[in-house]
Image (spheres, grey):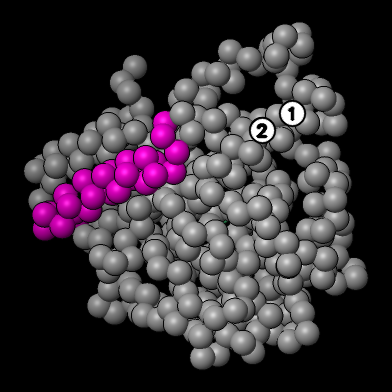
Amino acid sequence: MTEVYNFSAGPAMMPKAVLEQAQKELLNWLDQGTSVMEVSHRGKLFMELVTQAEADLRKLYNIPENYHVLFLQGGARGQFAAVPMNLKGKKGKALYLNSGHWSATAIKEARNFIEIDEINILDTEPQLKVNRLDFSDVADQYDYVHYCTNETISGVEIFDIPNVGDTPLIADMSSDILSRGIDISKFGMIYAGAQKNLGPAGITIVIIHDDLLGNARQDTPSIWNYAVQRDADSMINTPPTFAWYLCSLVFKHLLAEGGVKATEERNLAKAALLYDYLDSSKFYHNTVAKENRSLMNVTFTTGQDELNAKFVAEATACGLQALKGHKVLGGMRASIYNAMPIEGVQALIKFMQAFEQQNA
Ligand SMILES: *Cc1c(COP(=O)(O)O)cnc(C)c1O
């Protein structure tokens, strides 16, 4: 079998070493004679696992002590509703920055729970480009400001942190969490579904400043209530134990590989390779401004639907999987999350060169 590289946007590839360890331990976890998914989540061994997982995540991401880490369910979309249910305060209004599909989807969901002012921060002509990150003049009218650090579909990433004064800043980091260093103390809360950079689908990470806990509206369901989940060790209902376990292995793996700094360096190198190639080619086009080019999701097109379809089909046959762009955008998208080795990017570029030669 030829080496397969999986460029899926999510659920996305996992580190091979993690899958191998999970395979090795599957039938007999920690000498229990059972798998990890068959033991009580409140048992001693599983509680040790979650304690270590949180400690590892805190170490990886330099999470300050006055932040809580929650392991929830319902994905990022669940958080689109949970954020306003928990964080609506005296002002009764939130500011949402719109930079594309996911930030817009968050706005739509949140409107059910809070009054929203929306600012479009994305220029689309001549390129996709974020045009504003200073909101210090307006932010104090709002309970919080929400944005998305990486628009997974278009491949637009926001590297600078918006200036919102003292207003809590909330970020959907589903597709770039742990991909590069960030200063957590600049945020009121960040959240991410696990299935891009952290593990399998089914678990959602929330990192939240202590001050923001305990103000949920009265009718917030307990599984969505951050303070309730904090008090219950994120176990107000039975948690997705197997997904939690796999995330714990990913955290350990990232630490062993040198932590977030080393991960960031690898991600910068991978992305540079691919964007440099795209820039050198007249056959493929990427329409994102240089300062907002995602390190995680690289979008490109030949400009012709038929040729794009041919590209995807032939790439798939060569073991380069899941390169078809999202249906709202078309074209191609190579998702090169933490788990993608540089060899995968090199193999993709080699294929792209050959395809260009045959089809230009
Ligand atoms: C994938 C993704 C989502 C949706 O995540 P779910 O876990 O399916 O709800 C939301 N935001 C971003 C930025 C994403 O990449």
Quick check: 234 above or below 94? above
* Magenta-highlighted residues: 257-284
Please report contact status of discs 2 and 1: CB closer than 8 Å, yes or no: yes
Quadrant assignment, res 280:
bottom left
Question: Is 189 on the left or on the right of 148, as rendered?
Answer: right
> 88 or 298, which is in the foreground?
88
Q: Residue at x 59, y 20 (%)?
A: 22
Residue denoted by label 1: 48
Q: Secondary structure at mark 2?
A: helix
Which residue type carries mark 1?
Glu
Asked if one can make out residue 329 in the rendered structure from this viewpoint, the answer is no
Nearer to me, 223 or 314: 223
- Residue 24, placed above or below residue 61: above
Residue 132 is marked as none
Query: In the image as oriented, which residue stretches furthest toward the right?
Result: 218
Magenta stretch: dominant secondary structure? helix
Q: Position of residue 299 (x, y in %)?
A: 32, 56
Determine if the magenta segment contains residue 260. Answer: yes
Residue 288 x, y percent position in the rendering: 29, 66
Q: The N terminus lies in which quarter of the figure?
A: top left
Q: Which circle marks residue 52 in the picture?
A: 2
The amino acid type, in three-letter code, at marker 2 is Gln
Dot 1 falls on a residue whose secondary structure is helix
For residue 277, say whether it is visible: yes
